[in-house]
Amino acid sequence: MNLEDYLHKFENSVKAVDAKALKESGLEIQTGIWLNSTVIRLQKKHWANNPNEQPHSGSAIFMGIWINQQAFSNRVLNYNIHALRLRQLNGYALQSRAFATSFREKFKEFENKWENVSVQFAPQTLMEGKITLNDENIEKDILNIVNNFIEITPLIDETLLEFKKKTTNL
């Protein structure tokens, strides 16, 4: 498996994303090779204390689509939504399990649009799935995952609002 070949395919997928829908969603997309994987990461700036960190090690919520040697060998393309170190996310009083439970309840309405998806994880993985790797359709498959994520982006923002720190006026 050549990570650079997949990076090119991932970048082509990103170019095909509807620019207007992406802008309206407030999402930013990054592609790269991190941790021996070719990756697409989608997030809003306010979903991370350090949104440009690659890969994230601090507090962040983001969607990842990736392939590595193991996924390639299994002929799958992976995707998930991570919610890392939420207690530390600036501006919020978050508890990881409560956040995950609230998000997952909202996500139920959309689950049928996601192939091989599960929410049966610890709170740092809000959902995770995989699709069959088909090199001829990979760009279209990635685009479908991105479009599905654009549709559910408001669920993350709605859930974050539940945990927004209250400001007090003195």
Image (spheres, rainbow, N blue to C red):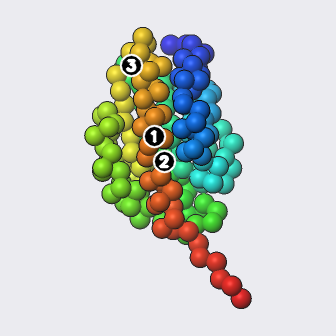
Q: Say which amino acid is labelled 2.
A: Thr
Q: Which label sits in the foreground, 1 or 3?
A: 1
Q: Are marks 1 and 2 in contact (CB under 8 Å)?
A: yes
Percent of width and height locating residue 61:
54, 50
Helix, strand or loop at label 1? It is helix
Q: Say which amino acid is labelled 1.
A: Phe
The residue at 68%/85% (across/down) is 169
Q: Are marks 3 and 2 in contact (CB under 8 Å)?
A: no
Q: Are marks 1 and 3 in contact (CB under 8 Å)?
A: no
How far apart in space, not on screen, are marks 3 and 2 (Cα)? 25 Å
The earlier-in-sequence mark between 3 and 2 is 3
Q: Is residue 38 left or right of residue 116?
A: right
Q: In the rendering, which numbered label is found on residue 133?
A: 3
How far apart in space, not on screen, are marks 1 and 2 (Cα)? 6 Å
Percent of width and height locating residue 69:
47, 21
Residue underneath mark 1: 149
Q: Nearer the viewer, residue 149 or 6?
A: 149
Q: Is residue 145 left or right of residue 120?
A: right
Residue underneath mark 2: 153
Q: Is residue 19 visible?
A: yes
**Going by the picture, which residue comes out furthest to the bottom?**
170
